[in-house]
């Protein structure tokens, strides 16, 4: 048998040491097999050993498998239930197909009857009430038996119940109170049913304690068979009480957003209380998690995506109310953003964050070639390794600065990041400022040329970059990235990529690895430029505030007059300065002297 492909081996090496499910994929990303494990790392190692786990169709699997992905769960029961959902969703050819929800047992109470019957059923029933599903059929049956042992509820059919003339054997072994022959009144039986419902709802602490005391008493009396039965009952109760987060008892619709410290996210989509889907990716990183969440929400949801009434988040953005209104408008109803603090939904948030952290480790180690191949197809260049992004920043057309950031194979390379002060007074002409900066970048020989340069802007910035490249005598692939505009306002939902020679822009698919990378490098360039701009403005304000008699109002007036360039005040005409409101000749002279002593 041929050994596993090297790409498959690399993918399996990223398996986490946690319970969950694994999806084995072919070269096109199609799922070949879905499996589960208590420890994913230990389980998937079997595929790397000669002969592996000995299954007959393993040769087919190893021949075609090229990749693997992982879904983290809280425990083995969750993994079993999630495996069922994944198999039904992907219908992998090497799995035994499970066609519907009849794979798992539920506990059922026929509440429409005067003396409700307890039983097990595959799938939910239209009448009565059900609890589940249970990961193991034995667990469901033991739980049913425990309920009978604790509350002596009947499990016979309605026909048998109606035709009994004497108690059955289950009454003799204390599994039924024999209401069929009047041994229990409907009122007392109803109280037992209410208690059983409370236990099935998870309120079983007192009963667990009773079972534990009974086990200890029987063990001390050397009644080991009774102690074993008590232990089994306690185990079944604990299993029933253990929360599982693939199916929820309340059939709610909501999404859960997990976000790790590096900007990787995992969105778990629950519909009708079931985990039906997840969306993963990477976002640009901000120091403020609320800002990151806000950016993600605007990218993940649109009018073409189903929006649930509730979204659970790791942090609330400052503009939460505005986002709720925006989402509600698209959803046609109220949408709430919440940060769960305790209970089941807090547990779900931790689950989403676990999935995001595993995805991040996977993406950091995964080949850069997937993103590079996407960029190559969009722009028409060879797959790049070194990518630069350029951004120009200004304040009302003045104090213009720029930045160039560099990423190598998808990772930041800060040693090559540069900031620029745009020398020419281009006013609000961003294109001329971009042309100057790109020309200076190409003339800077020490940094070397990138494989691709991304400019922040649209066609004007792209044409400016092409002119600068031609004047500099270099040939580097160039593209421009801009947010789509709706009613004159930039929209973070849609990104447009402009390439040379194209008559129309390319709309980038949300969540695509290529778009996420372009957004990250563009936003990093903008952040790098804007922090430099703010620092320069703060420095200018500091210099003026040191002049006695110049307060916030006069400082603002002087800055607006000089456009942030203090040399205009230092070298300007005194007669022009004194025409400014509130600036006397004496104060104007003091300001010029101060700047002459401070500025070079």
Image (cartoon, grey):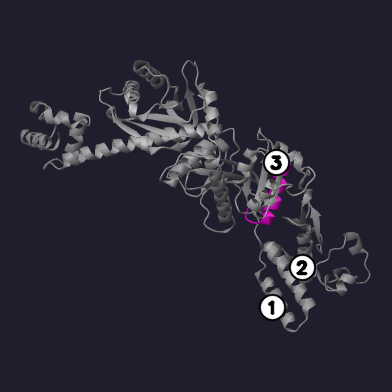
At label 2, counting other C-alpha atoms closer than 10 Å, the crowd grade (few under 14, some 14-19, many 20 or more) is many
Q: Nearer the viewer, residue 67 or 306?
A: 67
Dot 2 or dot 3, earlier in sequence? 3
Farthest residue toward the bottom?
221
Residue 589 numbered tag: none
Front label number (1 vs 3): 3
Give residue 473's position: percent from left, percent from top.
37, 17
Front label number (2 vs 3): 3
84 in magenta: yes
| Residue for badge 3 | 3
Q: Which residues are drawn in magenta?
A: 73-89
Tell me the CA gap for discs 2 and 3. Answer: 49 Å
Q: Is residue 212 visible?
A: yes
Q: Are marks 1 and 3 in contact (CB under 8 Å)?
A: no
Q: Who's the residue at 43% across and 43% down the image? A: 291
Give residue 536's position: percent from left, percent from top.
25, 37
| Residue for badge 2 | 146
Along the horizontal axis of the image, is 249 left or right of 341? right
Q: Nearer the viewer, residue 215 or 65?
A: 65
Q: Is residue 335 visible?
A: no
- The mark tally for this picture is 3
Q: Who's the residue at 33% across and 36% down the image? A: 530
Residue 213 numbered tag: 1
Q: Nearer the viewer, residue 56 or 95?
A: 56
Dot 1 or dot 3, earlier in sequence? 3
Along the horizontal axis of the image, is 356 left or right of 318? right
Dot 1 or dot 2, earlier in sequence? 2
Give residue 577's position: percent from left, percent from top.
11, 29
Quadrant position of the C terminus in the picture: top left
- Helix or strand or loop: what does disc 1 sit on? helix
Residue 95 drawn above or below residue 456? below
Q: Are marks 2 and 3 in contact (CB under 8 Å)?
A: no
């Amino acid at each position: 048998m041929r050994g596993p492909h090297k790409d498959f081996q690399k993918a399996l090496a990223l398996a986490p040491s946690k319970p969950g499910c694994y999806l084995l994929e072919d070269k096109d990303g199609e799922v070949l097999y879905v499996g589960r494990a208590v420890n994913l790392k230990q389980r998937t190692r079997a595929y790397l050993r000669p002969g592996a786990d000995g299954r007959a169709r393993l040769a087919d699997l190893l021949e075609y498998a090229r990749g693997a992905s992982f879904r983290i769960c809280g425990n083995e029961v969750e993994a079993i239930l999630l495996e069922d959902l994944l198999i039904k969703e992907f219908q992998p050819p090497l799995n035994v197909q499970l066609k519907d929800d009849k794979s798992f047992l539920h506990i059922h109470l026929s509440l429409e009857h005067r003396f409700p019957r307890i039983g097990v059923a595959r799938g939910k029933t239209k009448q009565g009430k059900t609890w589940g599903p249970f990961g193991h059929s034995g667990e469901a049956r033991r739980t049913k038996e425990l309920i009978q042992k604790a509350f002596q509820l009947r499990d016979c059919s309605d026909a048998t119940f109606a035709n009994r003339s004497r108690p059955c054997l289950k009454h003799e072994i204390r599994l039924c109170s024999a209401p069929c022959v009047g041994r229990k009144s409907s009122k007392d039986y109803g109280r037992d049913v209410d208690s059983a419902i409370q236990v099935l709802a998870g309120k079983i602490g007192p009963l667990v304690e009773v079972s534990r005391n009974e086990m200890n008493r029987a063990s001390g009396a050397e009644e080991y068979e009774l102690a074993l039965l008590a232990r089994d009952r306690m185990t079944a109760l604990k299993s029933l009480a253990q929360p599982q987060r693939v199916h929820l008892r309340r059939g709610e619709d909501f999404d859960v957003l997990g976000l790790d410290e590096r900007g990787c996210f995992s969105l778990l989509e629950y519909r009708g209380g079931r985990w039906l889907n997840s969306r993963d990716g990477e976002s640009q990183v901000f120091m403020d998690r609320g800002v990151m969440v806000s950016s993600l929400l605007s990218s993940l949801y649109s009018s073409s995506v189903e929006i649930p009434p509730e979204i659970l988040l790791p942090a609330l953005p400052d503009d939460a109310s505005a986002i709720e209104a925006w989402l509600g408008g698209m959803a046609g109803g109220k949408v709430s953003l919440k940060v769960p603090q305790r209970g089941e939904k807090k547990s779900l948030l931790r689950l989403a964050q676990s999935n995001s952290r595993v995805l991040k480790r996977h993406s950091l180690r995964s080949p850069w070639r997937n993103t590079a191949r996407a960029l190559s197809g969009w722009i028409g260049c060879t797959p790049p390794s070194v990518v630069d992004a350029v951004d120009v920043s200004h304040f009302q057309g003045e104090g213009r600065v720029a930045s160039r950031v560099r990423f190598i194979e998808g990772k930041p390379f800060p040693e090559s990041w540069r900031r620029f002060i745009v020398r020419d007074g281009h006013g609000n002409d961003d294109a001329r400022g971009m042309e100057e900066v790109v020309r200076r970048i190409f003339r800077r020989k020490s940094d070397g040329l990138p494989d691709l340069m991304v400019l922040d802007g649209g066609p004007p910035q792209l044409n400016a970059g092409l002119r600068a490249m031609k004047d500099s005598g270099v040939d580097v692939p160039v593209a421009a990235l801009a947010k789509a505009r709706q009613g004159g306002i930039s929209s973070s939902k849609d990104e447009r990529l402009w390439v040379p020679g194209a008559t129309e822009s390319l709309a980038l698919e949300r969540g695509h690895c290529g778009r996420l990378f372009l957004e990250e490098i563009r936003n990093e360039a903008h952040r790098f430029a804007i922090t430099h701009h703010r620092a320069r403005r703060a420095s200018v304000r500091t210099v003026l505030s040191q002049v006695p008699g110049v307060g916030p109002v006069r400082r603002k007036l002087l800055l607006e007059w000089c456009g942030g360039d203090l040399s205009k005040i230092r070298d300007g005409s005194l007669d022009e300065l004194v025409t400014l409101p509130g600036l006397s000749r004496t104060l104007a002279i003091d300001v010029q002297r101060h700047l002459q002593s401070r500025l070079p």
